Image: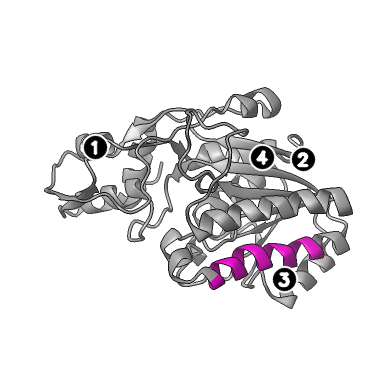
């Protein structure tokens, strides 16, 4: 297949590109390399064709119409919750208007399907666990709102234009290439600071739990969606919660060093417990998480050390 991957120089998108190329597909990357995003030239697979373009641009539309891809895999986004609260218009412009620009291009190009990187942030605080595809979405940030809104646009384009989709609602994705200096991605941040002997900050009591899923498993779900899961939504996560304190303990054991912990108050909007039921993805796509947390943490530490697996 010919596949366009937006955000294909970013953390998750670059792993998706690698997985597609390993399967023998032709891949075209669109990434703006926005300085506040995650796109880096060093992440670009040399076997892919790379175009530095903004997804909101006419040039991105022209490229898609010219290339006529079978699949659009859409991972480009304004992904920072903080930026979304500081600049909600920018967040909506990139995440909503950018998607609409691409969807119109796909209709013109005759593209069969869009695979969309949704987010568990679209759920907000939930009343019942585990989170499933049927859990009500009540986002609590502009980022979560735009991720929910774009799902509705995908359904509209399927009904009105015949453009199929698969939506993935990710848990907390981690792994090599995640920015260890950003405001999100606790595993990469902790690992990087412990390796340098720097203190780490743990908010609240540290017992709050999130569902951490390895980026290689996420890429495998994106491969499965090439031939399955049309016009459907799937939770993609590990199915279990892990506390911040436990992440800190395991990373210290792997690295062989403890560092000072600075305790901080709960961050506004932080959720105490969140984990997913991913049985639908297993049933429909044949997908399930494979990477054990301890092994995934080791891969992150090795990558930060520059160790090639």
Q: In the displayed structure, would residue 188 be above or below residue 90?
A: above
Mark 4 Cα within 10 Å, few/some/many (few <14, many 20+)? some
Q: CA distance from mark 2 to mark 4?
A: 16 Å
Q: Earlier in the sequence, mark 1 or mark 4?
A: 4
Tell me where residue 102 appears, x and y as whole percent: 74, 64
First in sequence: mark 2 or mark 4?
4
Q: CA distance from mark 1 to mark 2?
A: 38 Å
In space, the residues marked 1 and 4 are separated at their CA atoms by 33 Å
Where is mark 2, residue-wise? 231
SS at badge 1: helix
**Mark 1 lies on residue:** 245
- Our reading of the magenta stretch's main secondary structure is helix
Judging from the image, what secondary structure is the residue with disc 2 in?
loop
Question: Badge 2: how crowded within 10 Å, few (<14), some, or many (20+)?
Answer: some
Q: Which mark is residue 223?
A: 4
Pinpoint residue 44: horizontal percent, then vertical percent. 55, 60
Q: Which residue is mark 3?
A: 60
User: From the image, which quarter does the C terminus lie in?
Assistant: top left
Q: What stretch of residues is rendered in magenta?
A: 89-105
10 Å crowding of disc 1: few (<14), some (14-19), many (20+): some
Q: Which image quadrant is residue 9 in?
A: bottom right
Q: Is residue 45 visible?
A: no
The residue lying at 43 percent from left, 70 percent from top is 86
Residue under the point 88% across and 57% down: 110
Residue 265 in view (yes/no): yes
Q: What crowding class fits label 3: few (fewer than 14 Cα within 10 Å), some (14-19), or many (20 or more)?
A: many
Whole-Å distance between the Cαs marked 2 and 3? 24 Å
Q: Tell me if label 1 and label 4 are in contact, CB under 8 Å.
A: no
- Give the percent coordinates (x, y) of residue 148: 61, 51
Q: Is residue 282 above or below residue 147?
A: above
Q: Nearer the viewer, residue 211 or 11?
A: 211
């Amino acid at each position: 297949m010919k596949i366009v991957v937006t955000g294909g120089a970013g953390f998750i998108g670059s792993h998706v590109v690698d997985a597609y190329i390993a399967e023998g597909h032709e891949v075209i990357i669109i990434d703006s390399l926005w300085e506040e995003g995650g796109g880096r030239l060093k992440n670009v697979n040399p076997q892919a064709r790379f175009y530095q373009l903004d997804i909101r641009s006419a040039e991105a539309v022209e490229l898609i119409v010219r290339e006529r891809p079978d699949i659009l895999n859409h991972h480009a986004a304004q992904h920072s919750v903080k930026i979304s609260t500081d600049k909600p218009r920018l967040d909506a412009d990139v995440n909503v208007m950018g998607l609409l620009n691409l969807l119109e291009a796909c209709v013109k190009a005759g593209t069969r399907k869009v695979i969309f990187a949704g987010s568990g942030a679209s759920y907000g605080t939930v009343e019942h666990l585990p989170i499933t595809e049927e859990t009500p979405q009540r986002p609590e940030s502009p980022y979560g709102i735009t991720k929910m809104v774009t799902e509705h646009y995908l359904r509209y384009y399927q009904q009105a234009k015949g453009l199929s989709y698969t939506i993935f609602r990710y848990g907390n994705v981690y792994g090599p290439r995640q920015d260890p200096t950003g405001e999100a991605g606790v595993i990469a941040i902790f690992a990087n600071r412990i390796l340098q002997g720097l203190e780490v900050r743990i908010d609240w009591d540290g017992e709050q739990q999130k569902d951490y899923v390895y980026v290689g498993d996420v890429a495998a779900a994106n491969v499965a969606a090439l031939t399955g899961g049309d016009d459907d939504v799937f939770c993609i996560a590990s199915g279990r919660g892990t506390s911040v304190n436990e992440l800190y303990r395991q990373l210290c054991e792997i690295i062989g060093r403890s560092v000072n912990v600075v305790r901080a108050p709960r961050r506004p909007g932080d959720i105490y417990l969140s984990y997913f039921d991913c049985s639908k993805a297993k049933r429909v796509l044949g997908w399930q998480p494979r990477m054990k947390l301890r092994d995934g943490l080791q891969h992150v530490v090795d990558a930060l050390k520059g160790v090639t697996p």
